[in-house]
Each structure stands twice: as structure tokens, then as C-alpha cells.
């Protein structure tokens, strides 16, 4: 008889939108969930979920908080960096949150030994960061996600050597605060697709750009 060990997932940026739904669905599947929010003292809907959930404080721009998280979270099988900012945000913050923070998070988890070989890391990007050979600016948001994609491709060989399976992911155009009410995809459907993709990730997916429904996206 095979006994399924509980699996542990870390969701970075879990207060609402796609991140919250990731927490909800992984908990309902019996996973141990470690979730971060900037406001752990006011967890809102996160605090009402049942299951094996631990909430950690993290503003993804705060390197001390990140180091503390990486050292205290324990071993994680899957880490999803979902936190992101959209419109009407100063460009510097956009870059810090969307481009720099996901890379720093993976590095911190690896350095702390929180991810063993075979661990999976998903960095949420956007199709708006796809250059597809275009020259010039993609707008602040697109530029920030393109910068994430560029840095991800630089780091991917080293991360592979350290045993990690890492991808960047476009979650679809999703009805959240960021995506707006006209978006084509429900948050439930996006997250169900993301979870299916994550479950099937192998070394052959590493270092590439995927969509929520399992299609490869051009850079
Ligand atoms: N929705 C879409 O159509 C769409 C499309 C393409 C890509 N994406 C990407 O998908 C991800 C999730 O988007 P969403 O639609 O769920 O957005 P959302 O509803 O606006 O939620 C954004 C999340 O990021 C967190 N966050 C923002 N800045 C942070 C910081 N400095 N430190 C820690 N957490 C921070 C927010 O926390 P607070 O509650 O504390 O602000 C919130 O949990 C983002 O990376 C976004 O760029 C979304």
C-alpha cells in the first residue's frame, strides 16, 4: 500500500485574487499550505480557511522578512511566487515587486535549504512581459514582467544544477482586483489549471514560459 505523504506548498502573496484561491484549492486537496501576506494580523478571508495553514508575514520588498521566511518555513515541495502589482504603481515599486522579488525569493529558499532537488518553483509573470522580438518599452507593467523573464532565463541553468524545476507562468486574464471584471477567466478555473500544470511539471518544463492551461508561451 502506498501512503501519500502530505505535500507542502508555499504561496507568496496570498491575501486575495489568484494567491488566495491557490491557498484555498491546495488546502481542500489536503496539502500543507504556507502562505504569506503583508497583513498577518488582519488575515481576512485567509484566516477563515480550514486545514493545515500557516500564515507568514512578508512584504516581498523586505529582504530581512524574506530571509526569516526562508529559514522558518521548513521544507517546501512547491513554491509559487504570485505577489504582483499592476496599474497606477510607481515604476520603481513595479520593478521591485514584479521583477526582483520572485528571483530573490527562489534564491533565499535555495540558500536556506528549503527546497530539495526535485522541488518546483513557479514565478507568476504575464503575457504582457512577452517581447516576441518587439523593440522598446512594453509599458511599466510589461517591462517589469519582461525583466523578470529575462532574469529567470539567466538564472535557470544554475537553478537546474541545484535540482530545482522552475518555470515562469502566465495565469490567464483573470477576474481579480488586478484583472478586472471584464477578464475572461474565473479565478477558480485559472487556479485549477495552474495546479494541474504544477502537478505534471518535470525537468523538461524547467526554464520555460507556460500558460495556466499548460501551453508553452513564446518569450
Ligand atoms: N489577473 C490577471 O488577469 C493577471 C494576468 C497576468 C498576470 N497576473 C499576475 O498574477 C499575479 C496575481 O495577480 P492577481 O490578479 O491575483 O492580483 P491582485 O488581486 O491584485 O493580488 C495581488 C497580490 O499581490 C500581493 N502583493 C502586492 N504587492 C506586494 C508586496 N509588496 N508584498 C507582498 N505581497 C504583495 C497583494 O497583497 P496585498 O493584499 O497586501 O496588496 C495580493 O495578494 C500577479 O503577479 C499578476 O501580475 C495577473
Image (cartoon, helix red, strand yellow):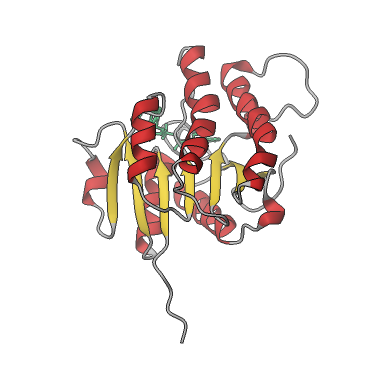
Estimate the x, y position of residue 187 in percent, counting from the top left.
46, 47
Horizontally, is 47 left or right of 215 in the view? left
Rendered residue at 45%/52% (across/down) = 188
Residue most extreme to the bottom = 1
Residue 159 seen anywhere in this rendered image of the structure: yes
The answer to which image quadrant residue 68 occupies is top left
Rendered residue at 69%/30% (across/down) = 130
Q: Which quadrant of the rendered structure holds the C terminus?
A: top right
Residue most extreme to the right = 133
Estimate the x, y position of residue 7 in percent, counting from the top left.
42, 62
Rendered residue at 22%/47% (across/down) = 47
Q: Which is nearer the eye, 17 or 155?
A: 155
Q: Which is nearer the eye, 63 or 94?
A: 63
Residue 184 seen anywhere in this rendered image of the structure: no
Estimate the x, y position of residue 162 in percent, counting from the top left.
61, 47
Height in image: 73 above or below 64?
below
Instruction: Report ligand 1 position as a quadrant.
Output: top left
Rendered residue at 41%/45% (across/down) = 11
Residue most extreme to the left = 41
Height in image: 194 above or below 127?
below
Estimate the x, y position of residue 123 in percent, counting from the top left.
55, 39
Horizontally, is 36 left or right of 139 in the view? left
The answer to which image quadrant residue 112 occupies is top left
Q: How many marks?
A: 0
Amino acid at each position: 500500500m502506498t501512503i501519500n505523504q502530505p505535500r507542502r506548498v508555499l504561496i507568496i502573496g496570498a491575501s486575495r485574487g489568484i494567491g488566495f484561491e491557490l491557498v484555498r484549492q491546495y488546502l481542500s486537496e489536503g496539502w500543507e499550505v504556507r502562505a504569506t501576506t503583508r497583513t498577518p494580523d488582519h488575515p481576512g478571508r485567509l484566516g477563515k480557511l480550514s486545514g493545515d495553514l500557516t500564515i507568514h508575514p512578508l512584504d516581498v520588498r523586505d529582504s530581512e522578512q524574506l530571509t526569516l521566511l526562508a529559514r522558518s518555513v521548513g521544507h517546501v515541495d512547491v513554491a509559487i511566487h504570485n505577489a504582483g502589482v499592476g496599474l497606477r504603481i510607481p515604476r520603481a515599486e513595479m520593478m521591485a515587486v514584479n521583477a526582483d522579488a520572485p528571483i530573490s525569493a527562489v534564491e533565499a529558499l535555495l540558500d536556506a535549504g528549503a527546497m530539495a532537488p526535485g522541488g518546483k518553483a513557479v514565478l507568476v509573470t504575464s503575457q504582457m512581459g512577452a517581447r516576441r522580438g518587439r523593440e522598446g518599452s512594453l509599458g511599466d507593467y510589461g517591462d517589469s514582467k519582461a525583466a523578470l523573464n529575462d532574469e529567470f532565463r539567466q538564472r535557470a541553468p544554475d537553478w537546474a544544477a541545484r535540482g530545482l524545476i522552475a518555470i515562469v507562468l502566465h495565469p490567464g486574464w483573470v477576474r481579480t482586483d488586478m484583472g478586472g471584471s471584464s477578464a475572461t477567466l474565473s479565478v477558480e478555473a485559472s487556479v485549477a489549471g495552474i495546479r494541474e500544470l504544477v502537478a505534471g511539471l518535470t525537468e523538461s518544463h524547467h526554464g520555460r514560459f507556460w500558460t495556466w492551461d499548460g501551453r508553452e508561451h513564446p518569450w
